[in-house]
Image (spheres, grey):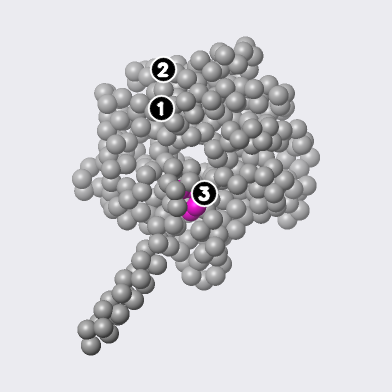
């Protein structure tokens, strides 16, 4: 009798462990914004999400920076987030410089020139200098992931989201590669992961994927992928962010790159040989949220090869915001129904944990 009870308890624990293991793996694939929080109160529901392992990463915006005692409160926020989390968090931010700059001087931080300005100077040491200042600051405040450098080429002078807002170093792939390498090196020195974006190239677009579908079928050229090839081959790529752009030369079905197996698995992982973490651009952006529905988009993205799904919760959508718990339940349901394989979840989990420094 004692043996039977012991066996049943052991079997029960194994079952619970297996279930928890899948839950934790799914949680690592979720990257979310934290609304307007500048602190994490003891009774905050977000603590529960972190304690249950339903979040793998946090995306910070300028609204998460307190107007007073900015540095001290940001450090405390990030420390509190890490302490509450079951597993080390990616705490991430968009810090490209220029117009995409959250840690502004008015909060007691630093000025950071745009990529276009640094590209015009075209001195790798200058780019290294400014990025060392930035990466040192990121490390000090507890941010360990930066959505930079931008590898998009400044090839379309009418591009509203790249050229016109000075987010590209240059129209020339080698100049972009040179300055991106300086940016990456500065961040590596300070133990901050960098994210190359927006794969496979947003520079030739004429519209904004925040607002709707972007089609570059007739404007994109292969040289837009050159900086990715050089940086991946040099072993300097931590992670890659996908673009919500359509190119029927890559995928004749017209799926955006974020949802396309042809782009992510066949091109990025196959042709370019990258086996690290792939992060989606914000799934709240209207190119995705208005056209595919969250559950369908999540299924397509994971099956395409995306490892972390970003929901910044900073863009108003008709479908509303999704909590980490809801996102987690959607992914788990897809696995249980067989729409996403557990093998795909395992692949992403291993890539994410490796980038976080865990040896599994």
**In the image, is residue 351 part of the stretch drawn in magenta?**
yes
Q: Is residue 266 left or right of residue 79?
A: right
Q: Is residue 50 above or below residue 105?
A: below
> As rendered, which of 334 and 343 lies closer to the eye?
343
Q: Secondary structure at mark 1?
A: helix
Quadrant assignment for the N terminus: bottom left
* Disc with the residue nearer the chain's start (1 vs 3): 1
* Disc with the residue nearer the chain's start (2 vs 1): 2
On the image, the x and y values in percent for residue 161 come to: 60, 31
The residue to which callout 2 is attached is: 110
Q: Please report the residue visible at 69 percent of the width from the left and 42 percent of the height from the top.
A: 272
C-alpha distance separating marks 3 and 2: 33 Å
On the image, the x and y values in percent for residue 307 come to: 53, 50
Q: Give the crowd class for mark 3: few <14, some 14-19, many >=20 residues within 10 Å.
A: some
Q: Give the crowd class for mark 2: few <14, some 14-19, many >=20 residues within 10 Å.
A: some
Residue lying at the far bottom in this picture: please name it: 1
Q: Please report the residue visible at 30 percent of the width from the left and 80 percent of the height from the top.
A: 7
The residue to which callout 3 is attached is: 351
C-alpha distance separating marks 1 and 3: 23 Å
The residue to which callout 1 is attached is: 138
> As rendered, which of 87 and 176 lies closer to the eye?
87
* Disc with the residue nearer the chain's start (3 vs 2): 2
For the residues carrying marks 1 and 3, which lies nearer the camera in this image? 3
Which residues lie in the magenta part? 349-353
Q: Is residue 275 above or below residue 119?
A: below
Q: Please report the residue visible at 45 percent of the width from the left and 52 percent of the height from the top.
A: 360
Q: Secondary structure at mark 3?
A: helix
Q: Which mark is residue 114?
A: none
């Amino acid at each position: 009798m004692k043996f039977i009870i012991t066996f049943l308890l052991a079997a029960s624990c194994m079952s619970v462990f297996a279930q928890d293991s899948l839950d934790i793996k799914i949680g690592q694939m979720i990257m979310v914004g934290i609304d307007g929080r500048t602190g994490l109160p003891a009774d905050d529901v977000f603590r529960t999400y972190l304690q249950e392992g339903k979040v793998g990463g946090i995306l910070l915006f300028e609204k998460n920076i307190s107007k007073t005692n900015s540095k001290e409160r940001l450090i405390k926020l990030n420390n509190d987030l890490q302490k509450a989390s079951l597993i080390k968090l990616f705490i991430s931010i968009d810090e490209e410089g220029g117009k995409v700059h959250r840690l502004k001087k008015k909060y007691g931080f630093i000025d950071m020139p745009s990529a276009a300005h640094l590209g015009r100077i075209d001195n790798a040491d200058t780019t290294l200098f400014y990025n060392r200042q930035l990466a040192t600051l990121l490390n000090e405040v507890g941010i360990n992931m930066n959505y930079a450098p931008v590898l998009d080429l400044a090839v379309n002078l009418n591009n509203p989201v790249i050229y016109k807002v000075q987010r590209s170093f240059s129209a020339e792939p080698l100049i972009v590669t040179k300055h991106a390498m300086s940016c990456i090196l500065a961040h590596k020195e300070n133990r901050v992961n960098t994210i190359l974006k927006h794969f496979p190239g947003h520079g030739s677009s004429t519209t904004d994927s925040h607002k709707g579908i972007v089609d570059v079928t007739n404007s994109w050229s292969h040289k837009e992928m050159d900086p990715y090839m050089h940086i991946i081959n040099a072993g300097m790529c931590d992670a890659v962010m996908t673009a919500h752009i359509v190119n029927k030369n890559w995928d004749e079905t017209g799926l955006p790159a974020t949802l396309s197996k042809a782009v992510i698995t066949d091109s990025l992982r196959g042709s370019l040989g990258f086996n690290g973490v792939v992060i989606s651009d914000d799934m709240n952006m209207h190119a995705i949220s208005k056209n595919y529905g969250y559950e369908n988009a999540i299924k397509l993205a994971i099956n395409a090869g995306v490892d972390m799904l970003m929901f910044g919760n900073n863009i108003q959508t008709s479908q509303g915001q999704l909590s980490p718990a809801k996102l987690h339940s959607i992914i788990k349901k897809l696995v249980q129904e067989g729409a996403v394989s557990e093998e795909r979840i395992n692949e992403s989990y291993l890539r994410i944990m490796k980038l976080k420094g865990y040896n599994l």
